[in-house]
Image (cartoon, helix red, strand yellow):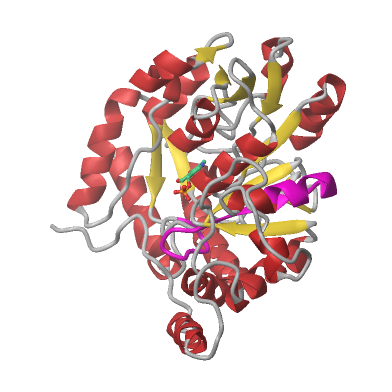
Amino acid sequence: MSIDIFLNKVFITGDEATYIAKAIAGSQNGEMISGDGSFTHRASEYLEKKFHVDQVLLTHSCTAALEMAAILADIQPGDEVIMPSYTFVSSANAFVLRGGVPVFVDIRLDTMNMDEKLIEAAITDKTKAIVPVHYAGVACEMDRIMELAEKYNLIVIEDAAQAIFSNYKGRPLGTIGHLGCFSFHETKNIVSGEGGALFINRPEMTARAEIIREKGTDRKAFLEGRVDKYTWRDIGSSYLPSDMLAAFLLAQLEHGEEITERRMKAWNIYDEILRPTGLLQLPEYGNSNQPNGHMYFGLVHDASKRRAFINGMAEQGIQALSHFVPLHTSPAGEKFCRISGSMDNTVSGATRLVRLPMYCGVEEHATRIANTAKEVLSGL
Ligand SMILES: Cc1ncc(COP(=O)(O)O)c(C=O)c1O
């Protein structure tokens, strides 16, 4: 049987093409279609108001937002940055590009997030920053992380690539640390094909951030009439998305709540069917979290059965997949990073994790998917 339900399917709100056409038409009337045009402003303002952020700068990816964050945090060769090994490459690579050394701490198996109890032991006099990665849009223990940051004078950069519209104790993820990095890649809840944003939560960082994003120039200040010509001020790169991308993004953001609700509906259907069976080790989110339905995952009890589960689902037309390969086991991770303490949970979780299809619209199929998962798991 061929796959008829894929892990991800992009949800189209219907307004994307209209907004992009407006951006194109505007380019014939003196409006900018490059970065920082009217849709860039509208999408950034939407995010600033919705999540009460000092400044939101759209980027062309979360990778770009993380690279900007590494420059803003002033990472110098040899500076250490604490993060989980169970994450996407960019969380670490952005800092390695600046000569920084990612230091991995183990994760908790109830969330797959960095274990906050292990962070303090990883802090040395070279530590400059902590990068909590909110896996599946579920919050790391931010109170403890911010307490440590205060105590040791560290910068907190939230990798909120998967966490748009998630909250921790009522506060939006990506707004708690100094900086928050978001992805609008097609696999995320809110998409623009490729895309991202940097949330700047400390007013003292905003001026430099807009220069870094504009190839190290003060072009943004020039466009806004704050300087009469623009010039090279600092290091930076071209991290700005075109206004057409921002037009697509705005169309998605305006439906953000509906998208989140529909994904959570699917998440709840899966959970109601699968949790009572005990066939998967499922995450425990606790009361601090209001997640965004980014992902439904569980751990098979026996890693050697994961492939059979994935194949069994595929035989029924449903795509289920594993996820990250821990960075400390990768060739570049071995070369550029170091571990702090045991990585037992990271390895155990990464070799047992499976994800079920999750997208806006999958709620219609969620009962079939969960029942199929139950059947396949029971037969392993
Ligand atoms: C945790 C995490 N960080 C960073 C990224 C990079 O995002 P982007 O593809 O927008 O650069 C991803 C993408 O999947 C991610 O999952």
Decide: is 43 above or below 371.
below
Decide: is 121 above or below 161.
above
Q: Position of residue 283 (x, y in %)?
A: 56, 38
* Left or right: 79, with 296 as reference point: right
* Left or right: 148, with 238 as reference point: right
Q: Quadrant of the C terminus?
A: top left
Q: How many marks?
A: 0
Quadrant of the image occupied by residue 288: top right
Q: Quadrant of the N terminus?
A: bottom left
Residue 330 appears in the rendering:
no
Residue depicted at x 51% and y 60%: 189
Q: Position of residue 373 (x, y in %)?
A: 34, 48
Q: Position of residue 38 (x, y in %)?
A: 62, 78
Decide: is 99 above or below 225.
above
Residue 354 appears in the rendering:
yes
Which residue appears farthest toward the left when viewing the image?
1
Residue depicted at x 49% and y 17%: 337
- Please check the rendered image and state whether residue 205 is part of the magenta-colored stretch, yes or no: yes
Nearer-the-camera pick, 181 or 233: 233
Residue depicted at x 60% and y 68%: 36
Quadrant of the image occupied by residue 347: top left
The part of the chain drawn in magenta is: 188-209
* Left or right: 82, with 271 as reference point: right
Nearer-the-camera pick, 201 or 372: 201
Q: Position of residue 308 (x, y in %)?
A: 23, 35
Residue depicted at x 41% and y 14%: 335
- Please check the rendered image and state whether residue 158 is part of the magenta-colored stretch, yes or no: no
